[in-house]
Image (spheres, rainbow, N blue to C red):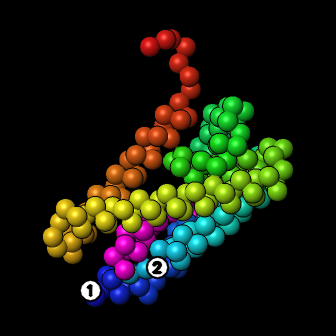
């Protein structure tokens, strides 16, 4: 096992928990790939990702309940996200809470904004946990299956894995950014 592999085996689970507590897609994709390579246990990765993501969003929701409006004034960039988010919330209440982790830019801001609404905490908690489960399986699964596909195409994966993982993570970042821009763009008044 090379040095990076030893580091992942030693600290990977901690990285998954704390990474998903804060934001997490990049860490979780990498952890899914590491699980496919045998460096981490995929079930543990999914469980820790669910735990970290759920706790992080619960804390953000509570922060929104407690100081949300003050945060919007103090951080205008956060405040600018409120109107498009509330429009989505009105139209797609349950779907938005389940998918909030997939919307780049709303992973942390979304639960804070939700905390300022009249959404009951038990309802948010249940949907938050279900969303965390879906997200953990989808994102870590993408990393895992990326490793499967890479092994099918490349004879000696270790020669190209750092470049391949870098491309995977960069692609995921760009795709998340692009999707969130489309989801939060105000509707156009002119037909296309």
Q: Is residue 133 left or right of residue 168?
A: right
Could you classify mark 1 by the number of other residues whose Cα lies within 10 Å: few (under 14), some (14-19), or many (20 or more)? few
Q: Please report contact status of discs 2 and 1: CB closer than 8 Å, yes or no.
A: no
Task: Determine which of the numbered discs, if any, sits on residue 41 in the image.
Answer: 2
* Residue 157 visible from this viewpoint: yes
Which element carries disc 2, helix, strand or loop?
Answer: loop
Classify residue 151 by image quadrant. bottom left
Name the residue at 62% across, 45% down: 78
151 over 99 or under it: above or below: below
Name the residue at 16% across, 73% down: 156
Tell me where residue 18 appears, x and y as whole percent.
56, 72
Q: CA distance from mark 2 to mark 1?
A: 18 Å
Q: Is residue 183 left or right of residue 121?
A: left
Which element carries disc 1, helix, strand or loop?
Answer: loop
64 over 22 or under it: above or below: above
Could you classify mark 2 by the number of other residues whose Cα lies within 10 Å: few (under 14), some (14-19), or many (20 or more)? some
Tell me where residue 75 appears, x and y as whole percent.
64, 48
Tell me where residue 163 appears, x and y as whole percent.
23, 64
Name the residue at 48% across, 37% down: 181
**In this picture, which residue range is highlighted in magenta?**
22-38
Q: Main secondary structure of the magenta part?
A: helix
Task: Determine which of the numbered discs, if any, sits on residue 2 in the image.
Answer: 1
In the picture, the quarter occupied by the N terminus is bottom left
Name the residue at 72% across, 61% down: 58
């Amino acid at each position: 096992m090379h040095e990076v592999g030893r580091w992942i085996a030693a600290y990977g689970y901690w990285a998954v928990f704390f990474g998903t507590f804060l934001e997490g897609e990049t860490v979780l994709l990498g952890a899914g790939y590491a699980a496919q390579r045998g460096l981490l246990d995929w079930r543990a990765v999914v469980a820790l990702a669910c735990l970290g993501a759920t706790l992080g969003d619960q804390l953000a929701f509570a922060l929104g309940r407690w100081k949300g409006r003050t945060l919007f004034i103090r951080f205008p960039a956060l405040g600018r996200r409120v109107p498009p988010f509330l429009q989505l919330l009105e139209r797609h209440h349950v779907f938005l809470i389940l998918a909030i982790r997939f919307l780049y830019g709303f992973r942390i801001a979304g639960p804070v904004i939700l905390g300022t609404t009249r959404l009951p905490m038990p309802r948010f908690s249940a949907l938050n946990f279900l969303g965390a489960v879906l997200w953990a399986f989808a994102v870590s699964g993408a990393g895992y299956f990326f490793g499967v596909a890479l092994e099918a195409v490349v004879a000696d994966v270790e020669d190209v894995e750092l470049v391949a993982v870098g491309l995977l993570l960069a692609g995921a970042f760009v795709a998340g950014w692009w999707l969130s821009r489309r989801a939060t763009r105000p509707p156009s008044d002119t037909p296309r």
